[in-house]
Amino acid sequence: MNISSIVVKTLPEHVQTVIENLRSTDFCEVHFHDTTGRIVVTIEGEDISEEMRKLKLIQGMPQVLSADLAYAYSERELALAREHITMMKDAVPDFLKE
């Protein structure tokens, strides 16, 4: 499972309309917005291609000026990193052990 946050930008006068459009979808969740036109949403996907499909749908919405990835989390990458750390636990050079 991947989870990513997206910063959506629109003109200040379109914030409420864009928020309503985002909330009417079944592929993202709105968390925050400000008066300058920035909206923070999260998307989830089984893999990066599903997340990219959802990002492109957001980018193509009416009144959206831009939608950019701000943060991404991948359970698979975390599992691989933990495995690597476990395998390398005794790989500390002797001069660093002193």
Image (tube, grey):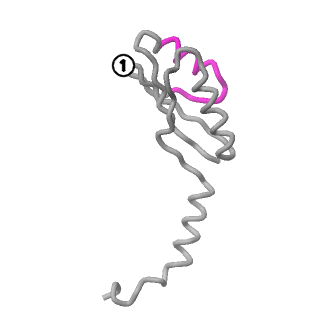
| Residue at 36% from the left image edge and 17% from the top image edge | 35
- In this view, the residue farthest toward the left is 98
Residue 34's place in the image compared with 74, above or below, is above
Q: Amino acid at mark 1?
A: Thr
Q: Is residue 94 magenta?
A: no
When the figure is inspected, residue 60 is found, relative to residue 75, above or below; the finding is above
Where is residue 4? Give x, y as percent: 54, 41
Q: Residue at x 56, y 59 (%)?
A: 78
Q: Which residues are magenta?
A: 16-30
Mark 1 nearby-residue class (10 Å; few <14, some 14–19, many ≥20)? few
Q: Which residue is mark 1?
A: 36
Residue 34: give x, y in percent of width and height.
38, 21
In the rendered image, residue 27 lying in the magenta stretch gets the answer yes
Q: Residue furthest top?
A: 13
Q: Position of residue 36 (x, y in %)?
A: 36, 19
Q: Residue at x 46, y 25 (%)?
A: 39
Which element carries disc 1, helix, strand or loop?
loop
Q: Looking at the picture, tell me which residue is in the foreground, 48 or 24.
A: 48
